[in-house]
Amino acid sequence: MAALSPNCAVCDVAASLTCTRCKMVRYCTGEHQKQHWPQHKSCCRPFRVQEDEQLGRYLVATQDIKAKQIIFVEEPLVVGPKWFLTEDEKLASIVPCVGCYTPCRLGKHQCRNCRWPVCSASCVHEKLECSVLSLGTAPTAKSDARALHDYYRHDALLVLKCLLLQRQQPERWQALLEMQSHAEERLGTELQQEAEQRIVSYLEQRFLQRLKQSKIRECCLLSDYEPELLHRLCGIIETNYMVIELATGVELSGLFRQACMMEHACQPNCYFQFDSVTQRIAVRAGCDMKRGDHLKITYTNILWGTQMRQHHLRMTKHFSCRCTRCEDPTEYGSYVSAMRCLGDVSKSCVGVQLPLDPLNEQTQWKCDTCPVLLDAAYVTEVQTHMTEEVDQLLAGRPTASQVELLLARLSQLLHPNHFHMFNLKHTLIQLYGHEPGLELAELSDIQLDRKQRLCDELYNVCQRLDPHSIKLAIYVSVILIEMAHTLEEQARRQPAQAMSQLELARSHVLEAVDVLEKAQDSVAGKKLHDKLQRDLFEHEKLTLALCHSQTAV
């Protein structure tokens, strides 16, 4: 996130006072803050908190807000290691430093006191947290990998950090306890059982039970660390945490009092950027917003189909989404869940199968052309099988021919825009032009035209699902880059149309630069930004070369 100006908004000298409401503007004196108030009051906190039975607490714009405008800046209640680790991450040899989250090798450096992994011998972390962790019996650095992974459970540290707020920052602790935990809904679920095994029992047995015998004065002042409270904290984290990606690629999880009130929608209108130095987030408008609009972010992958998004939200956030996209069987005309109709035994069909009630997991699917109905169980079985096939192929380093082969097979059952087809096509446009033997100059005209058509199809789907490229900034940027590369190659082959094609290619690159602003904090975003700068330079060289050759002719 770009740093906020450290200077006074009135006289531009170094300033330490900050507007207490928006935390976005600084002043050198209280007098200058009063002087600036007439200009600043209109942009200060342009939203209010509302509440109803269905949404709970949510945020509403109190004035028109321009795209990219900062709506508010907020400090976290707590920030800690990533929640919901994958199986591979649980067994990784590279882990985040317990002090600064820098990636470090497990077993190389350890904190002198608690023996947890640190990036260097000089790195220290929070004193009370270190004191609690020091109560455990840490394995030696030369222990086998299984023992190291079993002891150093970084995801459990997020719960511990929450627990320690009751001693360190009581106001934040109270704000944390006001957050929704879905305690009743979690009972008996896989999430609750996994939290018991991996987090609650682990913290209790390794550290917290020893607090009662501890002579550490600070630890004795923790008023409550019973299992019920630990499960409540797990529920609060599951329901409210926000994913934060550092410049190193390390993912953290954060809980923010106001940002966590933003409602979910499968087509969001806001995004946030994280400052790794101050640990504050800035929530920005992803598009122009009107007074009365709800501030919305998304808690799931918007490239998934409705059934998969709904399942993910029910499992991880304990609610079902009823946004306009989820209620629309076609999902804004994108058809990313749709299947092809195969007709019946007597007659084939070219129709599309769509869910009768997209919000019902057990709904039947009906063809839009013929009377054929499909049961939900059949659709789920087909989708699951195809998910396994696609994931298995993309987990390796597939060739263009392998991707084309799977696309051809899946196209017999899936709509061309289905999210599995989307992922395969998005991979394919990056292979055509880059795979050895399929560099741009080596592509046939037919292959080059296919790359262009695929880019157009993918871009159209993204525009329907995320017209302001709020969540799909990386995907859209890649598509625009590949569009530009295709047009540049066509310009080389068709000199008569070169200038118009190059002009269009440049517009795609500039659009990608603009779109990528929303993802500038991520590792992928930074890599793409650097690539775009090189592409612009190469584009200018190509334009000059083609102009020179045409002039010479």
Image: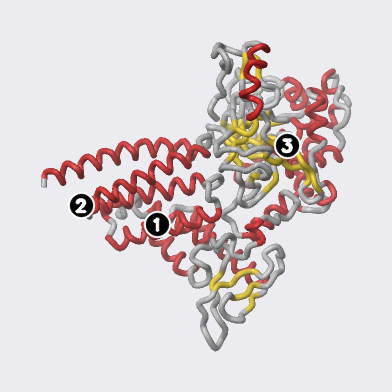
Does 206 sit above or below residue 19? below
Residue plotted at (65% across, 50% down): 265
Spatial CA distance of label 1 from label 3 is 51 Å
- Label 1's element? loop
Q: Nearer the viewer, residue 243 or 483?
A: 483
Residue marked by disc 3: 48
* Residue 84: quarter of image: top right
Quarter containing the N terminus: top right
Residue marked by disc 1: 399
| Residue 153 appears anywhere in the view | no
Q: Mark 2 or mark 1, which is nearer to you?
A: 2
User: In the image, what residue type sits under mark 3?
Assistant: Arg
Rendered location of residue 350, percent (x, y)? 50, 77
Label 2 with label 1: CB-CB less than 8 Å: no
First-in-chain label (1 vs 3): 3
First-in-chain label (2 vs 3): 3
User: In the image, what residue type sits under mark 2?
Assistant: Pro
Q: Residues within 10 Å of mark 3 (few under 14, many from 20)?
A: few
- Label 3's element? strand
Rendered location of residue 105, percent (x, y)? 57, 31
